[in-house]
Image: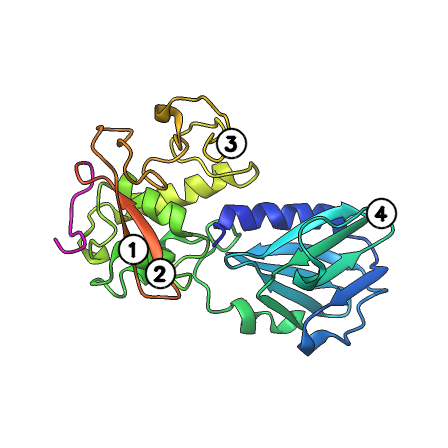
Amino acid sequence: MPEGDSVFRTAAQLHEALADRTLSVADLRVPAHATAVLAGRQVLDVTPRGKHLLTRLEGDLTLHTHLRMDGRWQVYRTGDRWTGGPGHQIRAVLGHEELTAVGYRLPVVQLLRTSDESTAVGHLGPDLLGPDWDPDEALRRLLADPARPVAEALLDQRNLAGIGNIYANELCFLGRTTPWQPVGELAGLELMVGWARHLLLVNRLRPGHTTTGDLRSDPIGCPGHAAPASRFRERNWVYGRGGRPCLRCGSTVRAAQRGAAPQQRVTYWCPTCQQGPTPGG
């Protein structure tokens, strides 16, 4: 599932392409809204709310979309071929005479009154990249269930909005705790929340996610790339580094499944740098 900074970047791209323009094409390819007539309406803005996207239109209408694991929006010059996937994966099309935004594999496509947006996103905690960011309220929500594992608590968008699995793993490493440590037992939880805000801010307008400060491209998946193993995945401390040396101490980073299907996620941690409970330990 995309991190909050990726959704922020998508919102910025959609806003630049659509805001203050009148739609000449608007096609919602979902049964609930297949007959909606949006062409002729002006796009007022595209706003991220945690991992949700709110495309606001004149006339008190908002198109609420969510990417979840596989969804994406792609912007094309109007008239160009759409290359983001087969036609049956398209869920939404918004365009004007110059640019067209196409939403692929969007699991959430909801048209609602702008005045009713709270029904879609009102449950979310403080947004790490939003004007409502409130670290004290985020801490209060995180500590409301002190026995909950810290990674699980960080991923709960009702506590604070914007953290995905990458940052949940990386924040636990930075906090020197395993992801299974009860959140109420962390002396450095306030620092961890501050790091979360910082990481999303610095990564919000650049591709990929770096927590180490290394901005080099990850060579994994590039056939014929001759970069040494030590260069692999150095943008993150532990995420995606299962079986590889910890960048801080050299111990082998471990990986395990966390949670139950369909929300099961892979968890990474360094057994030397991070202290606390572990699976089966």
Say which label, 2 or 3, has the lower sequence index.
3
* Residue of label 1: 257
Say which label, 4 or 1, has the lower sequence index.
4
Q: Is residue 205 visible?
A: yes
Q: Which residues are magenta?
A: 273-281
The amino acid pointed to by label 3 is: Cys
**Residue sitting at x 67%, y 46%:** 13
* Residue of label 2: 264
Circle 3 crowding by C-alpha within 10 Å: few under 14, some 14–19, many from 20:
few
Q: Residue furthest front?
A: 224
Say which label, 4 or 2, has the lower sequence index.
4
> Do the residues bearing badges 2 and 1 touch, measured as CB atoms within 8 Å?
yes
Circle 2 crowding by C-alpha within 10 Å: few under 14, some 14–19, many from 20:
few
Distance, label 4 to label 2, CA atoms, is 41 Å
Q: Residue 230 magenta-drawn?
A: no
Q: Position of residue 19 (x, y in %)?
A: 75, 52
**Residue sitting at x 21%, y 28%:** 249
Circle 1 crowding by C-alpha within 10 Å: few under 14, some 14–19, many from 20:
few
Residue 98 shows which numbered tag? 4
Instruction: Name the front one of labels 2 and 3.
Output: 3
> Do the residues bearing badges 4 and 2 touch, measured as CB atoms within 8 Å?
no
Instruction: Name the front one of labels 3 and 4.
Output: 3
Say which label, 1 or 3, has the lower sequence index.
3
* Residue of label 3: 222
Q: Residue furthest left?
A: 281
